[in-house]
């Protein structure tokens, strides 16, 4: 998937040929991705719909990388993985890793959260539970939904994908 999204690593509005997003094929058809125009259109209606679709999530992650702000989605995904952990030892280890990578004031991929949330999360992670990151994850989700998501929907990445699915669906119905 990484190589298929290669054209998106440039600035989001500079990718003139979105076909590189698609897998190599004779026609590079949308059919190969199993994406319908309705599905891609639904992404614009709901941030949840975008994140719950593997191609939507991949396109959104790639878009965020072009804006140098992929730490938010990577943090959100790390929190989703964290919630699935059952072992207290693994939970402690994963919580520490997430804190050091995303939450700590000197984190290499620090997410944009207020001081109070950072300190409360730090305290919660001293004795982590599956809910310890819920508040900070919700804040980052809200930030992406209000800020990054509207920019993604207006981006050339999304608009080109939407246009390609429309063209494919029109050809298919003829």
Image: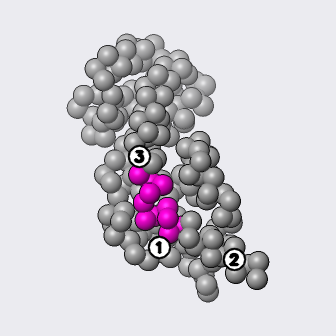
Question: Circle 3 is placed at which residue position?
Answer: 148
The C terminus lies in which quarter of the figure? bottom right
Q: Residue 11's quadrant in the figure? A: bottom left
| On screen, residue 76 above or below 119 | below
| On screen, residue 73 above or below 135 | below
Is the residue under label 2 in contact with that under label 1 (CB below 8 Å)? no
Secondary structure of the residue carrying tag 1 is helix
Q: Is residue 47 magenta?
A: no
User: Can residue 95 be spotted in the picture?
Assistant: no
Magenta span main SS: helix
Secondary structure of the residue carrying tag 2 is helix
Give the CA separation, mark 1 to mark 3.
20 Å
Q: Which residues are magenta?
A: 151-161
Please give the name of the residue rendered at 39% of the width and 19% of the height, measured from the top-left corner: 121
Question: Circle 2 is placed at which residue position?
Answer: 170
First along the sequence among labels 1 and 2: 1
Q: Residue 35: x percent and y percent?
A: 66, 64
Closer to the camera: disc 3 or disc 2? 2
Give the CA separation, mark 1 to mark 2.
18 Å
**Image position of 172 (left or right of 55):** right
Secondary structure of the residue carrying tag 3 is helix
Q: Residue 164: x percent and y percent?
A: 58, 73
First along the sequence among labels 1 and 3: 1
Please give the name of the residue rendered at 35% of the width and 65% of the height, measured from the top-left corner: 13
Please give the name of the residue rendered at 58% of the width and 58% of the height, measured from the top-left corner: 55
Please give the name of the residue rendered at 44% of the width and 57% of the height, measured from the top-left corner: 154
**Image position of 11 (left or right of 77):** left
Question: Circle 1 is placed at which residue position?
Answer: 18
Q: Residue 131: x percent and y percent?
A: 54, 20
């Amino acid at each position: 998937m990484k190589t298929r999204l290669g054209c998106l690593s440039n600035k989001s509005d500079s990718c003139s040929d979105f076909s590189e997003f698609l897998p190599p094929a004779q026609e590079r058809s949308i059919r190969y991705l199993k994406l319908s125009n309705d599905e891609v259109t639904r992404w614009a209606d709901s941030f949840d719909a975008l994140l719950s679709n593997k191609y939507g999530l991949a396109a959104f992650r790639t878009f965020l990388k072009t804006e140098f702000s992929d730490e938010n989605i990577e943090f959100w995904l790390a929190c989703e993985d964290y919630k699935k952990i059952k072992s207290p030892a693994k939970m402690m280890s994963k919580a520490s890793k997430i804190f050091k990578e995303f939450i700590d004031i000197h984190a290499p991929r620090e997410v944009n959260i207020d001081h109070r949330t950072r300190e409360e999360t730090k305290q919660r992670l001293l004795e982590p539970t599956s809910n310890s990151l819920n508040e900070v994850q919700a804040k980052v989700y809200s930030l992406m939904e209000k800020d990054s998501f509207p920019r993604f929907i207006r981006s050339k990445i999304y608009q080109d994908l939407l246009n390609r699915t429309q063209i494919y669906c029109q050809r298919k119905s003829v």
